[in-house]
Image (cartoon, rainbow, N blue to C red):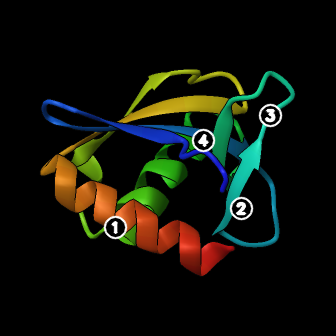
Amino acid sequence: MTARPWRQTADGVVLDVRVTPRSGRDAIEGIERRADGRAVLKARLRAAPVDGEANEALRRLIAKALGVAPRQVDVATGAATRVKRLQISGDAQLLNTMLERLTKAAS
């Protein structure tokens, strides 16, 4: 079983994501294990990594996939890199369940 790229916190979940900008479509493509052993959620975005466009597109993509408002998704670290850590606010158990479904569907 692949490790989960998220962990529950008191006010939601923290999610590690690897982004491929300038892709042909916006999509979540499952879980990948990085060379350092860390698991990340793979996401493709049409947006270019210019002026925060890719970060905003990622926030909208994740929010839509989890059924939360984009304002509940925050890029906590990695705003200028491909690997980002998102803080998603909300019911941690519900978000955990939604992420489980999302990653099963994308695999």
Q: Around disc 2, counting alpha carbons within 10 Å, would you say few (fewer than 14), some (14 to 19), or many (20 or more)?
A: some
Is residue 98 toward the left or the right of residue 37 in the image?
Answer: left
Residue under pointer 3: 34
Q: Nearer the viewer, mark 1 or mark 2?
A: 1
Q: Nearer the viewer, mark 2 or mark 3?
A: 3
Residue under pointer 4: 17
Is residue 10 toward the left or the right of residue 63 in the image?
Answer: left
Q: Around disc 3, counting alpha carbons within 10 Å, would you say few (fewer than 14), some (14 to 19), or many (20 or more)?
A: few
Q: CA distance from mark 3 to mark 1?
A: 23 Å
Q: Residue at x 45, y 41 (%)?
A: 6
Mark linked to residue 46: 2
> Would you say the residues marked 4 and 2 are in contact, meaning their CB atoms lie under 8 Å apart?
no
Can you name the residue that lies furthest to the front here?
Answer: 1
Q: CA distance from mark 4 to mark 2?
A: 16 Å
Amino acid, disc 1: Met
Going from N to C along the chain, the mark reached first, 4 or 2, is: 4
Is residue 69 toward the left or the right of residue 98 in the image?
Answer: left
Amino acid, disc 3: Arg
Can you name the residue that lies furthest to the right here?
Answer: 35
Q: Quick one: quadrant of the N terminus? A: bottom right
Q: Residue at x 66, y 39 (%)?
A: 39
Q: Nearer the viewer, mark 3 or mark 4?
A: 3
Residue under pointer 1: 98
Front-most of residues 65 and 53? 65
Q: Position of residue 33 (x, y in %)?
A: 77, 41
